[in-house]
Each structure stands twice: as C-alpha cells, then as structure tokens.
C-alpha cells in the first residue's frame, strides 16, 4: 500500500486539486443558474396551477353531487318497482276497499318509506326527511309526516311548481319527483324531501373561503343552495348569468378572471351538473384572492445555494488530501468482507447439505406412513368436498325458495282476499235470511186473521233484500270460494313437492309434471315479464332425482325471465333425441355476449351488480345435470335470445 501511495507526486497532485476545484465550481454555478431559472418558471406557473386545481376540485364535487342525486333517483325507482306498490295497485285493480286489503297494502308501503328514511344516510346524517305518495289527481295517499297533511287530504306539493324539473328547491328542502306507472298507466307520483343543509354541509362547505361563496343554481339564475348568504355575490351571479352559463358549459373550462362593471375584478370556477338543470360555481372577489410572487422564494434559494457552494468548496479542500488513502483502505475492507461472506456461505451450504441428507434418510424410513397419512387426508378432503357440494346445492335451492316466497305469498293472498270478501258477503246474506226466517216462525204461530199481514211483510222483506238475487249469488259465492281454495291447495302442493327433501335414489318421474309444478311455484316471478309457451312432446317417465330437476328448471326459467328487459316469451319444448330426453328452454331476451359464454357455468361468475345474485345459479344447473349423467348445451345470439338444451339419458326401469 505504501508503494502505491508514493506514485502521487506533489506537483501533479496540486494540479489535480486545482482542476477539480475549477470543474466543481463551474458545474455548481451552472446548477445554480438552472435552479434559479427553474424556480422562477415554476412559481410563475404556480398561480395557474392553483387555479386549475381549484377548478378540478370543484368539478370533482360536481360529479360527486351529480352521483348523489342520481342515487336518490335510483332509490325512488326501487320504491316504484318494489312489490309493495305493485301489491297495492293489484289489490286496487281487484276492487278491494280500504277495509279489506288496501289499508294493509298502504301500511306496508308507508313502512317501506319509513325504512328508507331510517336506512339511507350520508356521513351519518339522514338523507330523507319526508316521503309522499300521491294519486294521479294530486291527492296525498301516504305521507310519512302525517301532521303536515293539509285539510281535505290535499298535498302541500300542489303549491310547488315542478314544470319540467324532477328536482325543485322549496324553502329549506329539495323535493324530488318521480312518476309511478302500473301496467303502462300513470298512477301518481312519489315525492322525496331532502334538507338543503345536507348538500351545503357535505358538498359546498369544503370550498368555503372568507368573502367567497360556492353556489348551486338553476339555469334561470335561481339560487338553490349556497355555502353562505352573500347577497352581493348572488347579485353578481344574476347580472352575469349568461357569461357564467356560457363558460361553465365549455368542456375545457379551467377557471376565469373577469372584470365586473362597478364591482371590480372577480375569479370564478365551476361546472355544469350532467343530466340536470343545475350549475355549481365558486365566486371570489379581487380583495379576497392574492397572486403569489416568486421573488422572495427565489432570493432565499439564491442565498441558500451560495452558502451550500461555499460550504462544499471548503469541505472539499479540507478532505481532498485523504481521498487516495481512503480509497485504498475501503478497497481492502471490502475484500475482507467479501472473503468473510464467502466463508459464511460455504459453511451454510455444508450445514444445509448435512441437514438435507439427514431429513432424506428420515423421510425414506417414514415414507410408507407418510403415504398412508396423505391418502387418508385426501379421502377426508374428498368427503368434505362432497358434503360441501351437497350443502351448496341445498342452500341454493333454499335461497331460490326464499326468493320465491314473497311471490308465492302474493299468489296465495289473491284467492284469500276474495274468499274473505265472499265470506263477508255471505254473512250479510245470512243475516237477511235469518231475519226472513223469523217472520216465517211468527207466521207458524200466528192466528188466521194475521196471516195476510205477515205474508205481506214477508213479500215486502223479500223485495227489499232482493231474495232472488241472493239465491243465485250464494251459489256463485260457493263456486268462487271453492275455486280459490283449490288454487291455494294447488300452490301448496306444488311448493311441498318443490321443497321436499331430496331422494337418495333415482325414481321414475313425469318431466311434464315437474315443469308444470315449477311454473306454478315461480309464476309470480315471471308473469309480468314473460309469456310461457309449452310445446310438450310425448315422453316416457324418466328415472331421475325430481327435486334436482325442479332446481334445474327453476334456475333456468328465472334466468331467462331476468334476461328479458321489458316483456317477452319463454318457450319450453320437450322431445326425444338419440336416447336422450331433451328439455329446451328458449327466451327472447338480450342474449349472452360471445366473450363470456365460456364462463357462465363457472362458480361465482355473475353479470349482475354487486349485492345481486350469488353467481351460483348456472353452476348449480351444470353440476346437477352432470349428476344425472346428462349434458347441457347453449345457443345464444345477441339481441335475439338464448336457448338452453338439457339432455337427460333414458334409463330402463329396473
């Protein structure tokens, strides 16, 4: 090492130091000049960047507010499509009175409204304060805030002019209006009341600056809600409404300074809410915004860089004499470290090899027991998988029954409704007939001179009660009641057959009976969307598991109904082909896109939104068909419909 150090001569070393100092000073000077230029340019553009950031933040708020209002529309659309409103209008169409049926439906709708008010919140604040349902004449049917209903049951909303808007500002509220249609006919409207301070607190307060205002206004300049009541800024908004609307509608708008006559310079940012009549704008007067100047920061940076240059120069001068020596020492230390690391690695490899040899020896000794243990674990895993698969099928089946329960209850409720009405009518008839029989009893014990008086009273009573009509109507009441009871018994029998515990062995089954019982159980789920067409061929009884066949048919028919957007047709055809019983289920829905046809039978694959469906329906169908040693085929064309073919083998009856 001493021989290497003696290579550096004093003259050459001094020249090297001076050249290095000059080069370092030149490079540092260039760096300082570039830094100052960059800082000047950066701070020159800083104000533009801040304005752009303010505009982007306001646009994000506009998008969030627009999404918030769209979610409220979705809430009202879910109320309109709920089974509670459908049940009410169906009962009303059947001619039920408030006493028999309608009052229960109205109570269920009101409970649903109250549930929505309690359930929906935004940042732990309730969204809705009031929900109303009106008929097509504008009379209020349901109001969650009953004490505010005006006299003669007229809705307060008749004072509010909606015109073409779906959202109206009224006092301290936003009122959203959505029409209700049943079977294509206008039935009334649903109104939802939202407090303005919810919008102000969650969407406008974050932009609040002293002397400025964030305003949500209509296209006509009417202020809907503002972060604060600054009437001077409201006046600026109304006077320059056309300028604000013209600039906010531009897709590349990034904020703007504008000279206002007699009011000075202002700066404003904003955006138009898509799919609505609202504009969101923030207005800042000149005296409340300041443009940052880069001079002070650049001067501070220049002093800092000068101090850094001097400090680096003196540090380099003090430590340059030992650079060569330190390099050699570091190289030697590095070589020693590398040697130690290599030795450690070699020792670790030797230890690992000895350990591996020992483990291999022990493993060979216990190989037989390990294989036996692995085999037992594998058998246990297979049993658990079979159990889990069976539970999955059963849970999917029970989930289907749970989904259909509301529709079945409605199907049972309809005949029960007119049975109850018939019994009420029959009770009235019985009272009239009992009253008539009492006159006949008096006639039996009356004297001869009073016969004519009692006979006249009997004739008068018969005429008043319309005795001939009652005689004929009683038989109609019994026929209708018997028909309703038979309908309920049929639904219960089909449901019992559908939900019966699965058999352990295959039994001969009439496939057409399975189809009919399944259609009867799921009738309410598909009756508003699809017309069922049956094209039954001549089939023998098939040996199969009937409950699994019902589950296959339920999943496929409901899946076909859900694929139809409004109304359509589901065709069920049966025939024999190549020693297979074939069930073809076709729909006129939107079809399945080609890029996902290979995935629809995969477990947990679903095209529905999150929270709707489990993604197991078609997977369970595929699995159940395979358990029958059958096969399933799919044909689909986008915008034209889909067909599923289920092939069940024909087995000879033992």
Image (cartoon, rainbow, N blue to C red):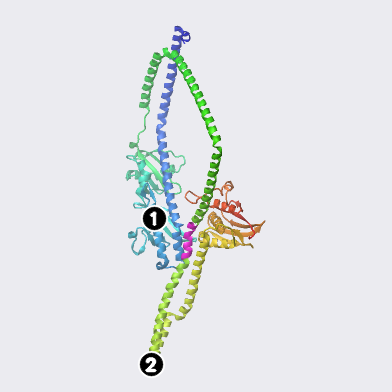
Percent x, y of residue 379: 54, 46
Taking the image as shown, residue 219 lies to the left or right of residue 551, namely left
Q: Secondary structure at mark 2?
A: helix
Q: Earlier in the sequence, mark 2 or mark 1?
A: 1
Span shown in magenta: 401-413
**Residue 449, numbered label:** 2
Contact, CB < 8 Å: mark 2 with mark 1? Answer: no
Q: Is residue 504 above or below residue 473?
A: above
Q: Is residue 476 visible?
A: yes
Residue highlighted by disc 1: 115
Q: Residue furthest toward the front?
A: 365
Percent x, y of residue 168: 39, 53
Q: Nearer the viewer, residue 394 or 458?
A: 394
Q: Secondary structure at mark 1?
A: helix
Q: Does the magenta-highlighted stretch encompass residue 570?
A: no
Q: Residue at (45%, 43%) from the top-left corner? A: 249
**Magenta residues, dominant SS class:** helix
Percent x, y of residue 385: 53, 48
Q: Residue at (55%, 35%) from the top-left corner? A: 365
């Amino acid at each position: 090492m001493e021989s290497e150090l003696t290579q550096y001569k004093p003259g050459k070393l001094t020249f090297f130091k001076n050249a290095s100092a000059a080069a370092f000073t030149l490079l540092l000077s260039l760096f300082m000049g570039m830094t100052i230029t960059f800082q000047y340019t950066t701070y020159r553009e800083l104000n533009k960047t801040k304005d752009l950031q303010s505009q982007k933040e306001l646009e994000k708020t506009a998008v969030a507010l627009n999404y918030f209002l769209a979610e409220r529309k979705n809430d009202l659309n879910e109320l309109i499509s709920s089974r509670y409103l459908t049940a009410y209008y169906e009962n009303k169409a059947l001619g039920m009175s408030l006493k028999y049926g309608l009052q229960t439906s109205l109570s269920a709708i009101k409970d649903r409204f109250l549930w929505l008010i309690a359930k929906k919140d935004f940042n732990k604040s309730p969204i809705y304060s009031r929900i109303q349902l009106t008929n097509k004449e504008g009379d209020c049917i349901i109001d969650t805030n009953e004490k505010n209903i005006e006299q003669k049951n007229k809705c307060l909303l008749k004072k509010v002019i909606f015109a073409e808007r779906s959202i109206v500002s009224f006092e301290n509220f936003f009122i959203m209006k959505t029409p209700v249609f049943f079977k294509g006919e206008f039935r009334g409207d649903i109104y939802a009341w939202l407090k303005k301070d919810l919008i102000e607190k969650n969407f406008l307060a974050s932009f609040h600056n002293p002397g400025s205002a964030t305003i949500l206004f209509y296209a006509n300049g009417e202020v809907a809600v503002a972060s604060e009541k600054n009437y001077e800024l409201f006046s600026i908004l109304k006077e320059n409404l056309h300028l604000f609307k013209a600039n906010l509608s531009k897709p590349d708008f990034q904020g703007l300074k504008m000279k206002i006559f007699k009011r000075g310079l202002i700066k404003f940012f904003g955006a138009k809410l898509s799919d609505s009549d609202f504009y969101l704008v923030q207005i800042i007067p000149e005296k409340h915004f300041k443009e940052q100047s880069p001079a002070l920061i650049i001067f501070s940076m220049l002093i800092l860089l000068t101090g850094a240059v001097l400090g680096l120069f003196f540090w380099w001068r003090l430590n340059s004499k030992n650079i060569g020596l330190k390099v050699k020492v570091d190289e030697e230390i590095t070589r020693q470290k590398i040697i130690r690391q290599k030795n450690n690695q070699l020792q670790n490899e030797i230890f690992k090899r000895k350990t591996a040899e020992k483990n291999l020896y022990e493993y060979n000794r216990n190989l037989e027991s390990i294989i036996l243990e692995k085999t037992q674990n594998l058998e246990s895993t297979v049993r658990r998988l079979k159990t889990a698969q069976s539970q999955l099928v059963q849970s999917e089946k029970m989930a289907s029954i749970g989904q259909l329960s509301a529709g079945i209850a409605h199907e049972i409720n309809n005949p029960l409704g007119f049975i109850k009405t018939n019994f009420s009518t029959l009770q009235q008839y019985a009272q009239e007939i009992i009253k008539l029989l009492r006159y006949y009893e008096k006639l039996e014990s009356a004297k001869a001179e009073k016969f004519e008086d009692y006979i006249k009273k009997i004739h008068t009573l018969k005429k008043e009660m319309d005795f001939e009509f009652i005689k004929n109507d009683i038989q109609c009441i019994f026929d209708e009641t018997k028909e309703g009871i038979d309908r309920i018994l049929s639904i219960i029998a089909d449901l019992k057959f559908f939900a019966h515990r699965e058999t352990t062995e295959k039994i001969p089954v009439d496939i057409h009976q399975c189809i009919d019982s399944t259609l009867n159980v799921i009738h309410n789920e598909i009756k508003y969307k699809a017309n069922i067409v049956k094209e039954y061929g001549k089939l023998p009884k098939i040996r199969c598991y009937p409950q699994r066949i019902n589950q296959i048919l339920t999943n496929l028919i409901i899946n076909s109904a859900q694929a139809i957007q409004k109304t359509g047709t589901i065709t069920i055809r049966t025939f024999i082909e190549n020693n297979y019983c074939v069930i073809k289920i076709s729909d006129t829905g939107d079809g399945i896109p080609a890029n996902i046809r290979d995935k629809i039978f995969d477990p947990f694959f679903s095209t529905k939104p999150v929270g709707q469906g489990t993604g197991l329906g078609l997977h369970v169908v595929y699995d159940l068909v395979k358990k029958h040693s059958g096969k399933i085929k799919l044909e689909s064309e986008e915008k034209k419909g889909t067909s599923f073919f289920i092939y069940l083998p024909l087995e000879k009856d033992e």
